[in-house]
Amino acid sequence: MISLRSMLQAAGVVAVRPRLWTTAIREAVRFVPDAWWSCRPWLPLPDRELVRWRTVAMYGCPDRRVNADDLIRWLYWCRSENRRRLTSM
């Protein structure tokens, strides 16, 4: 499960890397479920099951916290993939 503390730590890691701001926002929005406003706690929080699945896929364990270095690497990868998709169109 992702906590507010984890999200704030991730935001802090990304905050010092302006090149990743757009990518981080784009990817964060992709993790938010549709119609998030219709369920408690009425915040655009990532879907728990998606976060769990991604954590298991990455680390093999649903309870492991995402490492800051892994987060940055993943965001750079997302950034390069988004650019690659745009240039191949």
Image (cartoon, rainbow, N blue to C red):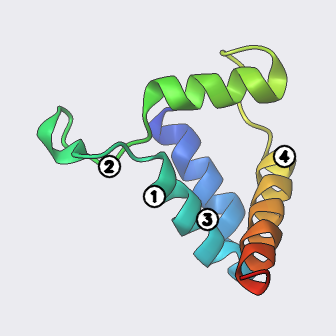
State the residue position of label 2: 44
In the rendered image, which residue does mark 3 sit on?
24
Between the C-alphas of marks 3 and 1, the distance is: 9 Å
Q: Give the alpha-carbon distance from disc 3 to disc 4, as whole Å.
A: 13 Å
Mark pair 3, 2: CA separation: 15 Å
Say which of 30 and 61 sits in front.
Answer: 30
Give the structural element (helix, strand or loop) at label 2. loop
Name the residue type under label 1: Val
Q: Position of residue 20 (x, y in %)?
A: 70, 74
Give yes or no for contact between labels 3 and 2 (Cβ–Cβ under 8 Å). Answer: no
Of labels 2 and 4, earlier in sequence is: 2
Instruction: Mark 2: give few (<14), some (14-19) or many (20+) Cα within 10 Å.
Output: some
User: Is tag 1's residue or tag 4's residue first in the polypeptide sequence?
Assistant: 1
Residue 36 % position (x, y) = 24, 44
Residue 7, numbered circle: none
Q: What residue did someone put label 4 on?
A: 70
Q: Residue at x 67, y 16 (%)?
A: 62
Distance in Å between CA atoms under marks 1 and 4: 19 Å
The residues bearing labels 2 and 4 have C-alpha atoms spaced at a distance of 23 Å
> What residue is at 74 percent from the left and 74 percent from the top?
85
Near-viewer residue (84 or 5): 84
Amino acid type at circle 2 is: Pro
Which residue position is annotated with label 1?
29
Q: Specify whether 65 is left or right of 37.
A: right
Quadrant of residue 23 within the rendered picture: bottom right
* 55 shown above or below 42: above
Q: Secondary structure at mark 1?
A: helix
**Helix, strand or loop for disc 3:** helix
